[in-house]
Image (cartoon, coloured by chain):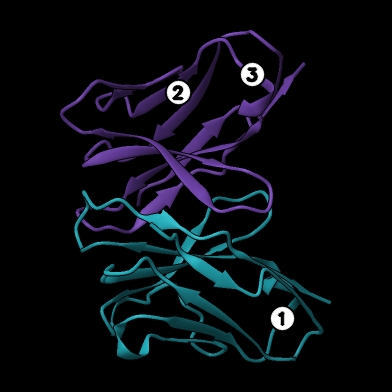
Chain colours: A cyan, B purple
Amino acid sequence: EAGVAQSPRYKIIEKRQSVAFWCNPISGHATLYWYQQILGQGPKLLIQFQNNGVVDDSQLPKDRFSAERLKGVDSTLKIQPAKLEDSAVYLCASSLGQGVRETQYFGPGTRLLVL
Amino acid sequence: KQEVTQIPAALSVPEGENLVLNCSFTDSAIYNLQWFRQDPGKGLTSLLLIQSSQREQTSGRLNASLDKSSGRSTLYIAASQPGDSATYLCAVPLGGSEKLVFGKGTKLTVNP
């Protein structure tokens, strides 16, 4: 079974530029998550999708971050404009369904450096 | 508000040693607790998930315990190997949701 795929793996941009990350979840997984992991910290949930609908985006900085999951499969996370403090690893995860007992499977992450 | 703390932040041990990683959480009303492993440049891999009704879970050389009343969990690694070198994170769901709250992790180095 293929895992969660993310691209690109690394990205270096200058502040005020825009950047987009892509995630392809495990086939059949209805729930998709984007996490931000700053160096030395644990991952923090940015947004959760159930199929193509948003379940929780309470910690997404909506003035600069946006995410979509068209057709309920792949998802993109965009930052525009980027700030220095956005330097982090962006992790995508998916689970079969919703619920506290569902296991989340994580992708390898996209490491973003904002200069 | 749920807060998860992991001690120590880093640990270095010689190969073959048994070791314990600690995780504490402020709200004891949790559904489960999960331990993850993170290798450099890679995502998170789930190691063990303990339901609130359980006191421990074992997988190979790993044993995780849970004491809800005291808000603590430990991950015990027996006979450590250099391949165990990684960052270990614990996480609990926030309330009854799937939203995971993570600790900052413990970076483990096992020296040959």
Q: Is residue B64 visible?
A: no
Which percent across, then down, holds residue B72? 37, 26
Could you tell me the amino acid type at mark 2?
A: Leu
Residue under pointer 1: A83
Local packing at callout 2 (Cα closer than 10 Å; few below 14, some 14-19, many 20+) is many
Q: The residue marked by circle 2 belongs to what chain?
A: B
Is A89 drawn above or below residue A47 in the view shown?
above
Is A97 drawn above or below residue B51 in the view shown?
below
Residue under pointer 2: B75
**Proximity of marks 2 and 3: CB atoms separated by less than 8 Å:** no
Q: Residue at x 82, y 84 (%)?
A: A14
Which percent across, then down, holds residue B94? 30, 53
Which numbered mark, 1 or 3, is in the foreground of this view? Answer: 3
Q: Which dot marks residue B81?
A: 3
> Would residue A42 appear left or right of B64 to someone viewing this image?
right
Is B97 drawn above or below residue B90 in the view shown?
below
Which percent across, then down, holds residue A108? 57, 59
Q: Which dot marks residue A14?
A: none
Q: The residue marked by circle 3 belongs to what chain?
A: B
Kindly state the secondary structure of the residue where label 2 is placed: strand
Q: Quadrant of the C terminus of chain A?
A: bottom right
Which numbered mark, 2 or 3, is in the foreground of this view? Answer: 3
**Proximity of marks 1 and 3: CB atoms separated by less than 8 Å:** no
